[in-house]
Image (tube, grey):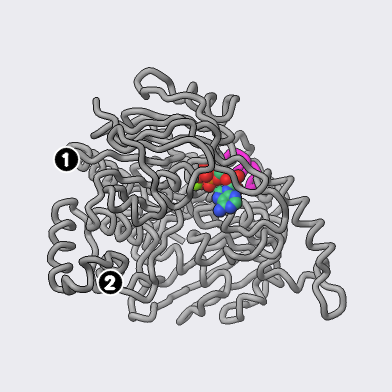
């Protein structure tokens, strides 16, 4: 084995936090090395130190046995290291091709876009990546944006690829494909650092380094440990993900909270994204939404929260027609939304936790004093939520872009869970959360249901939908292809509906 990259007692501090403490980590040539740990354990920070994005205060870095210092990502890129960040750094108004070429100062623009286009096309072929080079990045789904980032790293000639939670934004099918591609890269001699919260991926890697509170707990080979042992290494306790719940409230569910009829929506490019969607969610009911991402889920969530206006159809909330009203009115009526693309849609990253905690809900009586915001009250409420959701942060003023990915997600969850009171719309709410937090979030969702909320829950984890939902609606090509009872269905049946096969008597 040849060690490519190594850290010796690496230490990185932020005000009030030791994000990495005496970390000894090594990456071997041609291995997939997974970093595993709770939200805020220091995985992204360690990766960013390896990529020259942060400079560690203590310890040292070695590349191919020689000490190195990366003063910036440029140095790291020069040394053949590529990184795909947890929160992408693409330019939305540039095309895929422009995004790949931008920043490659030396060659890119001079080389000419035509030459670049050829290289990108050949990389796409080699790795079976399906991307339209002239599409605008702003029009791409998050999963597709990730491929742009990966291509960019390959284009820059990375030999070491650091992927920070790549599969958090991918569908299960895309994740499998990503893993196939990573394995292929490994065969070609690339070395990969993979951050993941998903046990299947962790177990497929060659070695796993577990981090806890900034320190290395240990480095193990997956075939020497069980998932349970790994989880215990990560959190120091066992986690019970199966949510025990009773489904005895079927009567209550008959009282409809949300009734949607014949909803259709065309996007700006005239694609029919929602096609005659009809569904009902009752009081105290969780309606699961299953589907391959990009089949209208995002648009459905946006229509139901007033972000976009449907072309036709109606939305009735607690007996009142509300389609076409601006989103403010949805919030005033107690509709909460957890969007799937948290950094673009759910947060203002430069703002503090407490501002983000009231984002959109600032007109709430609790937060105002006459025409002014009541900052004291907002601070108190934010601190309570930080506590309740165990958000790891030095204070309520900490900007959200200083939080770890999972902790930023918790800010949105806390905000929407506490402010909504009738309808909770949750699109991939557990994305990027560690297993312990997922357990907590699921318990919260069940608690909301038991308080009488109507919940629309989309998740790419079918198992979780089967566990949590009272009914599951399946969406394909913008249409609801069936509504099934989780207790009397199978993954196969849902799979067929997801592929567009229609079920008789679908709502
Ligand atoms: N730029 C920053 N400024 C201040 N503190 C930071 C900054 N980046 C990270 N931290 C802190 O360092 C700690 C480790 O964060 P890091 O992002 O490395 O965690 P992580 O393991 O990647 O978690 P997640 O799974 O949630 O992404 C956290 O307490 C975080 O708040
Ligand atoms: Mg992270």
Q: Is residue 366 magenta?
A: no
State the residue at coordinates (87%, 78%).
Answer: 370
Q: Position of residue 347 (x, y in %)?
A: 58, 64
Q: Is residue 253 visible?
A: no
The picture quadrant where one finds residue 398 is bottom right
Q: Position of residue 406 (x, y in %)?
A: 55, 48
**Residue underneath mark 1:** 188
Give the residue furthest to the top: 224
**Residue underneath mark 2:** 98
State the residue at coordinates (35%, 34%).
Answer: 33
The picture quadrant where one finds residue 438 is top right
Of helix, strand and loop, which one carries label 2? Answer: helix
Q: Position of residue 465 (x, y in %)?
A: 49, 45
The picture quadrant where one finds residue 474 is bottom left
Instruction: Point out the stretch of residues depicted in magenta.
Output: 438-446
- Measure the alpha-carbon separation of dots 1 and 2: 27 Å
């Amino acid at each position: 084995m040849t060690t490519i990259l190594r850290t010796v007692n690496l230490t990185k501090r932020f005000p009030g936090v030791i994000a990495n403490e005496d970390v000894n980590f090594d990456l071997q040539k041609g291995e997939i090395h997974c970093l595993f740990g709770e939200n805020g354990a220091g995985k992204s920070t360690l990766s960013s130190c390896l990529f020259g994005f942060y400079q560690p205060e203590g310890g040292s870095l070695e590349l191919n046995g020689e000490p190195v210092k990366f003063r910036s990502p440029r140095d790291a890129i020069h040394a053949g290291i590529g990184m795909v960040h947890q929160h992408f750094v693409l330019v939305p108004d540039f095309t895929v091709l422009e995004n790949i070429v931008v920043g490659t100062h030396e060659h890119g623009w001079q080389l000419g876009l035509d030459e670049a286009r050829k290289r990108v096309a050949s990389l796409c072929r080699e790795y079976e990546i399906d991307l339209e080079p002239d599409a605008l990045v702003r029009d791409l789904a998050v999963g597709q944006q990730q491929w742009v980032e990966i291509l960019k790293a390959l284009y820059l000639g990375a030999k070491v690829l650091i992927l920070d939670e790549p599969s958090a934004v991918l569908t299960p099918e895309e994740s499998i494909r990503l893993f196939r591609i990573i394995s292929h890269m490994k065969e070609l001699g690339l070395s990969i650092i993979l951050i993941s919260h998903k046990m299947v991926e962790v177990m497929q890697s060659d070695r796993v380094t577990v981090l806890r509170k900034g320190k290395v707990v240990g480095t193990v080979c997956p075939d020497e440990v069980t998932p349970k042992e790994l989880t215990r290494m990560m959190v120091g306790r066992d986690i019970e993900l199966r949510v025990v719940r009773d489904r005895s409230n079927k009567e209550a569910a008959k009282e409809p909270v949300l009734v949607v009829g014949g909803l259709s929506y065309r996007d700006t490019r005239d694609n029919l994204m929602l096609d005659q969607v009809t569904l009902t969610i009752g009081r105290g009911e969780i309606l699961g939404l299953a589907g391959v991402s990009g089949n209208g889920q995002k648009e459905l969530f946006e229509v139901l929260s007033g972000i976009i206006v449907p072309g036709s159809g109606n939305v009735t909330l607690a007996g009142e027609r509300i389609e076409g009203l601006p989103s403010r009115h949805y919030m005033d009526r107690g509709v909460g939304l957890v969007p799937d693309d948290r950094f673009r849609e759910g947060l203002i990253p430069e703002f503090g936790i407490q501002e983000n905690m009231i984002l959109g809900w600032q007109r709430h009586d609790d937060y105002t004093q006459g025409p002014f915001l009541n900052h004291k009250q907002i601070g108190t409420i934010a601190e309570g939520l930080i506590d309740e959701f165990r958000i790891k942060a030095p204070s309520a003023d900490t900007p959200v872009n200083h939080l770890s990915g999972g902790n930023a997600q918790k800010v949105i969850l806390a905000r929407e869970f506490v402010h909504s009171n009738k309808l909770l719309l949750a699109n991939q709410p557990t994305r990027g959360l560690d297993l312990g937090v997922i357990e907590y979030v699921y318990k919260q969702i069940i608690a909301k249901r038991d308080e009488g909320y109507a919940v629309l829950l989309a998740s790419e984890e079918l198992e979780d939908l089967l566990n949590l939902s009272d009914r599951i609606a399946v969406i394909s090509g913008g249409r609801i292809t069936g509504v099934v009872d989780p207790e009397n269905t199978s993954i196969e049946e849902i799979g067929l509906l997801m592929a567009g096969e229609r079920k008789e008597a679908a709502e």
